[in-house]
Structure formats: C-alpha cells, structure tokens
Image (tube, rainbow, N blue to C red):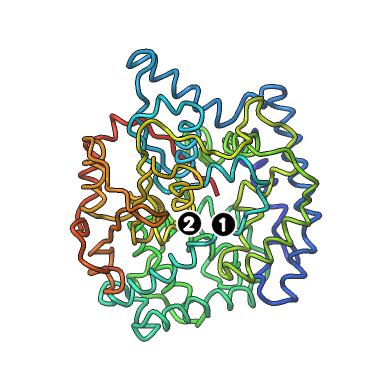
C-alpha cells in the first residue's frame, strides 16, 4: 500500500513524539489512562486515512476478500489435486484455525482430518463486533509471562536474569515490572519506535526505550521458546541500562526480537507492507453498529485495568480489531450466524495455556458444546508459546499421529480437555514442577518437530499473525 519505506515509516510514526500516543504506559494509573484516551482522535484520523488509501488502491475488489473466499479456494485446490469431492485434510494454525472452523461450517461433509491449533475464535470473529471482545486477546498472555518467570527460576543456571530476582518467579516478575515502570517514567518520547522494531534499537540510552517498545518485544519473546534466551538477554540489558552499569557481554540483544528479514527490494519485509490481513480480517466482520475509536480506547483501558495490566495497552497499534469500525468494505460472503453445524469427522483442537497470541479459552470454546461439541476433541497443552509448535512434547506428537492414523482421542463427555499434554524441558532446562501435573499415559516430553516432519507436506496449512 505504501510505495516506499519512507512513506510507511512516516505514516506509522505519526503516533510517536513527545506528548504523543507513543509515550503511554500500562494504563493502570488514572492520569496515564486519561492521557491515552485523549489520543483517540489522532488514531481515528489515521484509521480513516488508512481505509481511504486502501480503497483508492483496491477499489471494488476488496469485497471479494475474506475468509469465506479463502475456504472456497482451499476446497477448489483439493478438488483439483485430489479429485472433486475429496475430503479436505487441513492443519490450521492461528488465523488458519479460523479458516478450519469456517470449513466445518461451509463444507461440513468435506471435513477429513482437520486440526485447529493456536486457536483464534472464528465464531466470535464472524458474529461479534471486533472491539466488543478485545479483552479475549489477553486472557493467556499474562499467564505466559508468569510461566516464563517460573521456567527462568527453575532453570536459573541458564536464565541469567533469575539472579536479579532472587531466583524466584515472584522476584523475577518484580524486576520485569521495575523495568517497564521505569521505561514509562523516563522515556523522553523522541525515539521512533517503528524504526526500532524494524531495524533494531539504535541506542543504549534508556530514555529512548518506550514502554510500548519493551512490551511489544516481550510479547515477541514469548511467542516461541527459541527466543527465550533472547528475552533473558533483553531483560539483563534493560536492567543494566536503567541502572547505569555495563551489560554483561553474554547479554547481547538478539535482532530476531526486533528486526524481521528484509526483502531484496525493500528494507521492510513484504509481510509488513502487505495489508491483506487487514482486508481479510475486517471484511469478515459484521457491519459497524456505531462503534467509535473513542469506544476502542475506553475498552482498551478497561482491559488493561481488569484483564492484562502488562499488555492490553498494545491494542490500538497491535490489533487488527482497531481498524474495522472505520473499514468501509465488507465481504460479499460472510458467516453471520452462530456456528452450530457439526462436521462429518471429528476435529482435533489444540490450545496452549500460555499462548501470548490466542488464549486457551478460545480453543476450549470452539471445542465446546456451543460450537463443535462431540465432533471435536480438545487437547490442553500446558506450555508457553503460540501453537503446539512452540513446545516439545511426545504427548502432542502421539495425539496428532494417532489422529491422522484414524485413532481419535476418547471424548471426556464435557467441555473440558479430552487430553492434557505437558513438557518436561524448556529452553532453560527442566520444566517447573508445577507444569508437570499428574502422570497420565500421554504425558511425556520429546520432539514436536519429529511429528511435524511426517505430515506437514500432507496437510494444507494457513497461518497469519492475527493480533
């Protein structure tokens, strides 16, 4: 949508600068919350401009973009490759889980072996105004951060930041809060956060690190356990910077927390410049019912004060929900009714208890009697990260391989999990004892990648960063 990197940066950096939106904190202090809400009109103008630019470049074609169209394309591909009427075998991760749920409602008789993983609630997505359930986005991320501190404490010989917090989860969390509170207090508002997120921080001056930059980076570090040691180094570096002492040589910042890989024709990668995700997300949703950007900011403050004091303030700039009330186009085909159709085959639904992107509650609801019911089996994975690929577990491997082979987990007969899986190892060593739970037959640890290598080429997946 933007012709140059400069145009992209200029647009998004409108929110930065002294006394502007980018200087907000966690919104739990009344003065900060009131300041944040005062920035709604500026953000409103941005979303209107964004919508107008999109309409200018895409025009009438926007109404043909949406998840229903994606599902029809998926079915067409299966017909073309495997023969008309063949079962659709699909592993949907993140937004892909919404595609999978739509498939069960649009083509229930075509559902073969379908896995919904890192579940985004596709039914609410289709039937509830986006900002009306924004608090759902944060129902697991606080748990994810808590679990990270538990793992850091349990593996303190590998997690160096543990020493700063007396090697206890509570002490580590207290030090993280000290870092984020200090960043809000001393940030001078002059650093262009968007540039830092794309290219990596350009300074070790702690007054240039905003609360939002740090919180966004923490969420990235929680996304995948391969980044946990990078998150450890980040905390060590920030604490040292704010304390005015040199950081440990071992605490070098990992660019993966900030800078995505650039494209040959642009310093900004295509998945940042490609706004198809906005078009698909907003085109699926119900027509606006009078919601305003001020409502969005008020609801964000409510979520920060009642659900997620560390992360909910990210909503306007980090959630696609924030743009839909000003988005003019809607898809010609949408699913606006409750999703109560039952597919011909049982669907496997996997949710992580510490998923920083899609909460476990979403997986539980999709698998419940309210939606898929007896035609779903719910796997509760007690780990941190987005989707089952974020942790190593023989339990997950076994469940998935058996499911693909035709052995469906036994139905527990209620809306709770049918299978519970845990991990025994994290990036810091042995998992905390509180994660292990009781010793059920399927509760072991191992390599998820082994499982993935066997069928990733068989199943058609579609994943997108939705939040």
**Can you say which quadrant of the picture contains the N terminus?**
top right
- Residue 100 place in picture, x, y as percent: 44, 35
Q: Is residue 371 visible?
A: yes
Which element carries disc 1, helix, strand or loop?
Answer: helix
Viewer-proximal residue among 372 and 275: 372
Q: How far is disc 1 from disc 2 in space, using C-alphas?
A: 8 Å
Quadrant of res 126 = top right
Looking at the image, which residue sits at the far front?
A: 413
Taking the image as shown, residue 448 lies to the left or right of residue 292, namely left
Q: Is residue 412 above or below residue 54?
A: below
Q: Is residue 84 left or right of residue 57?
A: left
Any mark on residue 136, and which? 1
Where's residue 275, x and y in %? 60, 36
- For the point 58% across and 40% down, the residue is 338
| Residue 168 relative to residue 291: left or right | left
Mark 1 or 2, nearer chain start: 1
Task: Report if the CB atoms under discs 1 and 2 are less than 8 Å apart.
Answer: yes
Q: Residue at x 45, y 35 (%)?
A: 342
Q: Return the x and y of residue 24 as percentages of the image width and height.
A: 68, 67
Q: Which quarter of the figure has residue 236?
A: bottom left
Q: Nearer the viewer, residue 415 or 197?
A: 415
- Disc assigned to residue 228: none
* Left or right placement of residue 49 versus residue 170 in this view: right
| Pointer 2 local density, CA inside 10 Å: few below 14, some 14–19, many at least 20 | some
Residue 456 horizontal/vertical position (percent): 29, 35
The mark found on residue 361 in the picture is 2
Mark 1 closeness class: few <14, some 14–19, many ≥20 residues within 10 Å: some
Residue furthest out toward the bottom: 166
| SS type, badge 2 | helix
Q: Nearer the viewer, mark 1 or mark 2?
A: 2
């Amino acid at each position: 949508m933007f012709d140059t990197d400069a145009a992209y940066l200029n647009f998004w950096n409108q929110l930065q600068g002294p006394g502007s939106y980018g200087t907000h904190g966690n919104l739990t202090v009344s003065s900060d919350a009131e300041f944040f809400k005062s920035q709604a009109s500026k953000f409103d103008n941005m979303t209107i401009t964004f919508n107008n630019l999109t309409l200018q470049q895409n025009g009438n074609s926007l109404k043909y973009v949406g998840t229903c169209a994606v599902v029809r394309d998926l079915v067409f591909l299966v017909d073309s490759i495997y023969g008309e009427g063949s079962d659709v075998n699909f592993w949907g991760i993140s937004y892909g889980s919404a595609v999978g749920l739509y498939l069960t409602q649009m083509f229930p008789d075509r559902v073969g072996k379908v896995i919904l993983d890192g579940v985004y609630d596709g039914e609410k997505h289709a039937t509830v105004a986006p900002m009306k359930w924004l608090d759902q986005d944060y129902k697991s991320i606080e748990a994810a951060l808590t679990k990270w501190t538990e793992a850091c404490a349990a593996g303190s010989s590998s997690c160096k930041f543990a020493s700063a917090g007396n090697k206890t989860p509570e002490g580590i969390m207290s030090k993280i809060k000290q870092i984020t509170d200090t960043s809000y207090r001393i940030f001078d508002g002059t650093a262009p956060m968007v540039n830092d997120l794309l290219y990596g921080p350009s300074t070790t001056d702690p007054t240039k690190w905003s609360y939002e930059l740090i919180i966004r980076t923490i969420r990235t570090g929680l996304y995948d356990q391969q980044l946990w040691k990078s998150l450890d180094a980040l905390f060590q570096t920030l604490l040292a910077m704010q304390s005015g002492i040199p950081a440990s040589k071992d605490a070098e910042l990992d660019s993966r927390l900030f800078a995505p890989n650039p494209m040959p024709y642009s310093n900004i990668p295509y998945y940042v410049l490609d706004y198809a995700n906005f078009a698909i997300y907003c085109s699926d949703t119900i027509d606006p019912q009078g919601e305003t950007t001020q409502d969005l900011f008020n609801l964000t403050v409510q979520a920060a004060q009642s659900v997620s004091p560390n992360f909910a303030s990210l909503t306007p700039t980090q959630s696609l929900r924030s743009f839909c009330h000003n988005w003019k186009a809607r898809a010609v085909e949408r699913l606006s009714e409750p999703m109560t159709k039952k597919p011909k085959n049982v669907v496997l639904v996997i949710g992580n208890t510490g998923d920083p992107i899609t909460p476990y509650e979403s997986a539980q609801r999709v698998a419940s009697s309210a939606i898929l019911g007896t035609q779903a089996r719910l796997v509760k994975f007690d780990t941190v990260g987005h989707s089952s690929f974020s942790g190593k577990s023989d339990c997950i491997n076994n469940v998935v391989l058996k499911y693909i082979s035709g052995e469906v987990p036994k139905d527990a007969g209620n809306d709770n999990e049918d299978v519970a899986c845990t991990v025994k190892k994290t990036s810091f060593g042995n998992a905390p004892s509180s994660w292990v739970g009781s010793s059920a037959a399927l509760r072991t640890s191992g390599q998820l990648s082994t499982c993935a290598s066997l069928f990733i080429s068989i199943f058609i997946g579609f994943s997108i960063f939705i939040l």
